[in-house]
Amino acid sequence: MVNDSVRVVAKMNAMDEASPQKKENRGKSRPEQEFEPRPLDRLAYSPAEFAGLFDHAAVWGYRRIYDGDVKVLRQGGRLLIPRAEIERFLASVTTYDGMRKRNRRNVKEGR
C-alpha cells in the first residue's frame, strides 16, 4: 500500500518536472489569444459544426434551429445548415446596447 502511494507521488513529481510551464501559469488566467476568423469553405454545416464556428457547444446550434433563428435542410435524417443561411444569420446580428430584457411576467401583465 505504501509502495503504491510512493509510486503515485513519484509519478506526479515527474509530470510536474516535465511540464514547467504548468507551474508558471498556476493561478494566472489564460493568455489572450488572437482571434482568427474561420473561413466558410463548405456548402453546408451540421448544427455542431455551425456552433463550432461561433465557439459554442453543439446544443447552442440546435437551439438556434429550434428557435427559428436559422433554417436547415434535411438530408437522409441529417440536419444541414447552408452556408448562405450562416451568412444571413451573421448579417442579422445587432450590437449589444447593455439594456436588460423586460421581465416576461411584466410583459404579460401589461406593465
Image (cartoon, helix red, strand yellow):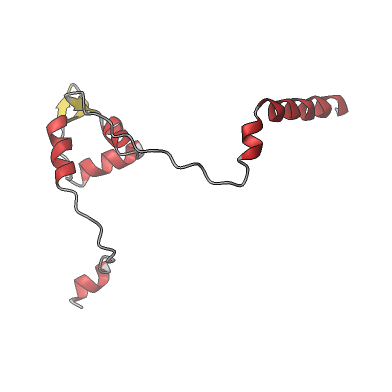
Q: Is residue 73 above or below residue 62?
A: above
| Residue in the foreground of this view, choosing between 107 and 101 | 101
Percent across and percent down for residue 18 are: 68, 25
Quadrant assignment, res 58: top left
- Closest to the observer, 78 or 47: 47
| Quadrant location, the N terminus | top right
Give the residue displayed 13% in from the left and 40% down from the top: 88
Image-based side of 7 in relation to 84, left or right? right
Residue occupying the far bottom of the picture: 111
Which residue: 29% across, 30% down? 49
Q: Is residue 71 visible?
A: no
Which residue appears at 20% of the width and 78% of the height?
A: 111
Q: Position of residue 29 (x, y in %)?
A: 53, 46
Number of marks drawn:
0
Instruction: Write down the quadrant of residue 89 in the picture.
Output: top left
Vertically, is 97 above or below 75? below
27 or 70: nearer the viewer: 27
111 lies above or below 59 = below
- In the rendered image, the residue lying farthest to the top is 76
Taking depth in this image into account, of 19 and 102 the one nearest to the observer is 19
Spot occupied by residue 90 in the image (x, y as percentages of width and height): 18, 42
The location of residue 68, given as percent across then percent down, is 17, 45
* Residue 43 visible, this orientation: yes
- Residue name at image x 16 percent, y 30 percent: 83
